[in-house]
Amino acid sequence: MMFSRARTPLFIVPKTVLLLALLSGFVFLGGCGSSGGGNLSQSPERSGVVHGPGQYPGWFLNPPESQGALAAGLSRHSQIYPENSLEAAARDGEAALRAQRGLRVSYNSFWEVLPGQTGRETGREFFTDTLGVQPTDVQLLGEAVIGNLHLGLFGSTVMNADHRLRTPGRRPDWVLQTPTSETYDFGVGSHPAFINEHTAWKRAEIQALKNLAAGLEVRVQLLDRRLNALQGGARFLQSDIYADWFEVAARWRDDRNVYVLVRARAVSVLE
């Protein structure tokens, strides 16, 4: 992915942060490799923010409604090859920009119904397809490094995003109660905030997508069959939706979990 770099102030990386990164090693997720950094090697000096845990850019915690023109990208950070982790964040940001302009979410699960009306899930299938047009003239508008998490704010136009560092603050209402609206459909997802924070945020977003799809309409197919000579059955739940506009609406975390709120507009159920 090619993008230009907006002017941002330079921040100095503390030596202690660099030493800890060298001792702990590094892992790349999402197919990031050495070839991906080539597009960025000719950019000006990389600028970013390195700070302590518990603070995030405002545009990450509370993304502005962008209408498909602004999105955050995430990757696993490496102090040794920062351009590669920035390139991985850029690819993730590009996918988010495409999803804003059109996204299909399919979530299917297969349940075995046991005697006594108990049941267990025996299989599941989940996929998304970003159907939106690939964005052009994407710029790097903001960048932050939080431990092993590399964040980038990407967009085709400069918008009024909050670049100040903020703590997650008090627990928002949407963590416990999914919002309702005449304009949007919402989904909330969470995941334990273990050492790989990048993976935790992405899995929470996937869970939010699953809950968004499952909460709209689920087609159920019941199949009768014999289980251990007793009457039992199977249940297949299928939810397949398409949204012509989608984005992450908010993020929050506490000491144990990360939470993601997603919203979609003009959702239709695919037949």
Image (cartoon, grey):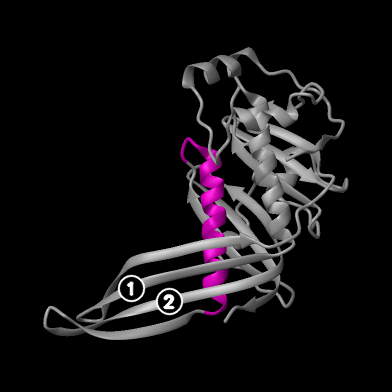
Considering the image in quadrants, where does the C terminus appear?
A: bottom right
Counting residues from the start of the chain, the first of labels 1 and 2 encountered is 1
Magenta highlight on residue 211: yes
Magenta highlight on residue 164: no
Crowd around label 2: few <14 · some 14–19 · many ≥20 (10 Å): some
| One can see residue 67 in this view | yes
Identify which residue is drawn at 48% across, 51% down: 191
Identify the amino acid type marked 1. Trp
Identify which residue is drawn at 59% across, 26% down: 78
| One can see residue 173 in this view | no
Tell me, yes or no, whether the two marked residues, 1 and 2, touch with CB atoms within 8 Å: yes
Q: Mark 1 points at which residue?
A: 111
Identify which residue is drawn at 74% across, 24% down: 41
Q: Is mark 1 on a helix, strand or loop?
A: strand
Q: Name the residue under label 2.
A: 237
Considering the image in quadrants, where does the N terminus appear?
A: top right
Distance in Å between CA atoms under marks 1 and 2:
8 Å
Name the residue at the left extreme: 229
Identify which residue is drawn at 68% across, 27% down: 83
Horizontally, is 117 left or right of 248 in the view?
left
Region rendered in magenta? 194-217
